[in-house]
Image: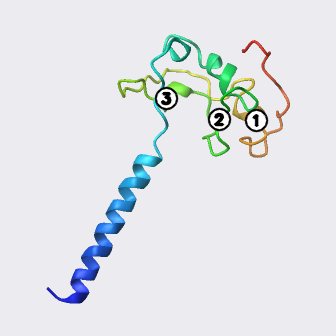
Amino acid sequence: MSRRRRLLLWLLAAAVLFGALLLVASKPPRLPADRDHALDQAEAHCLSCHWHVGRHPRPPDHPLRDDCFSCHRDPGGDLHPRAGAPTNLPGGWADDPRLARGSATAGARPSPGGP
């Protein structure tokens, strides 16, 4: 095998490995297996901790959606999207100055006890 072909194979292997790592790292985290993250609650409950000044705020690069169960998998790895789930909730992405890109509704806040 020529040097050039061997180098090309190494570069291809590195690109595949990098792509696989990028794919794994870009998945949303799974929901913890505790009662705070139960699947039978409304998405608005998630914002009681995950709004921008909550105990565990969403990162600035979070997608502009509030239908949590459409992306975050349960502890078993299954998705539970809900038909008609709200994608824009009070206190959600549109009210988060770090996430809202040009939103005119920034400023509304959920109550301290949660929505």
Viewer-side label of 1, 3? 1
Q: Is residue 5 left or right of residue 115?
A: left
Q: Position of residue 14 (x, y in %)?
A: 33, 68
Q: Nearer the viewer, residue 99 or 2?
A: 2
Quarter of the image where one finds residue 79: top left
Q: CA distance from mark 2 to mark 1?
A: 9 Å
Q: Is residue 105 left or right of residue 12?
A: right
Quarter in which the C terminus is drawn:
top right
Identified at 49% across, 29% down, the residue is 70
The local crowd at label 2, few if under 14, some if 14 to 19, many if 20 or more residues have their Cα within 10 Å, is many
Q: Nearer the viewer, residue 70 or 9?
A: 9
- The residue wearing badge 2 is 58
Whichever of labels 3 and 2 marks the residue nearer the N terminus, that label is 2
Could you tell me the amino acid type at mark 2? Arg
Could you tell me the amino acid type at mark 3? Ser
Could you tell me the amino acid type at mark 1? Asp
The local crowd at label 1, few if under 14, some if 14 to 19, many if 20 or more residues have their Cα within 10 Å, is many
